[in-house]
Image: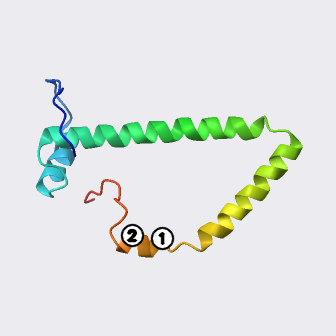
Amino acid sequence: MPRSGHRRKVSTTISPEAYEFLRRLVESGQAASLAEAVDQVVLCARRAESRSRLEQATAAYFARLSQPAAQEEKKLGLALRQSGDEVSFDDCLLSGNVKLPLQTRS
């Protein structure tokens, strides 16, 4: 994770479970420090929040489409699905060209 020169000092207490989760990220090598582990968790939360906002905006967009526009979107979606069927995502993952989200032990 890139380091920023504009870091803020935070002093707080967290639950034992949260501390263990962060500590495991460091021990497993997924984070270099507790601070980096916190940054990773916050990044994941921000991504989830952004995804939720995008889903809501997408739903609102489709809810207000006219019937002809909805039919055109459906045609485009089918064409995109067919082209996506031609892509081997397994090959992409195995080649290392895709960074997977944070993984932790259970």
Q: Mark 2 points at which residue?
A: 93
Q: Mark 1 points at which residue?
A: 89
Residue 70 screen position, x and y as percent: 81, 46
Dot 1: what SS? helix
Where residue 84 appears, as percent x and y from the top left, is 60, 67
Query: Contact (CB < 8 A) between labels 1 and 2?
Result: yes
**Residue at x-position 25% and y-position 60%:** 105
Find residue 18 and report its image quarter: top left
Q: Which quadrant of the view contains residue 13? A: top left
Q: Establish if 98 lies above or below 86.
A: above
- Amino acid type of disc 1? Phe
Instruction: Reply above or below: 103 against 5.
Output: below
Task: Check the picture and name the quadrant holding the C terminus.
Answer: bottom left
Task: Answer above or below: position of 2 versus 4.
Answer: below
Q: Residue 37 carries which label?
A: none
Q: How crowded is mark 2: few (under 14 residues within 10 Å), some or many (20 or more)?
A: few
Secondary structure of residue under mark 2: helix
x, y (%) of residue 44? 35, 43
Judged left or right of residue 63, residue 28 is: left
Q: Say which quarter of the image contains residue 75.
A: bottom right
In the figure, 75 relative to 40: above or below?
below
Q: Which residue is drawn at 68% across and 40% down?
A: 59
Amino acid tagged 2: Leu
Q: How far apart are the alpha carbons under marks 1 and 2?
A: 6 Å
> How far across and down, in percent of the image, does residue 92 sit?
42, 70
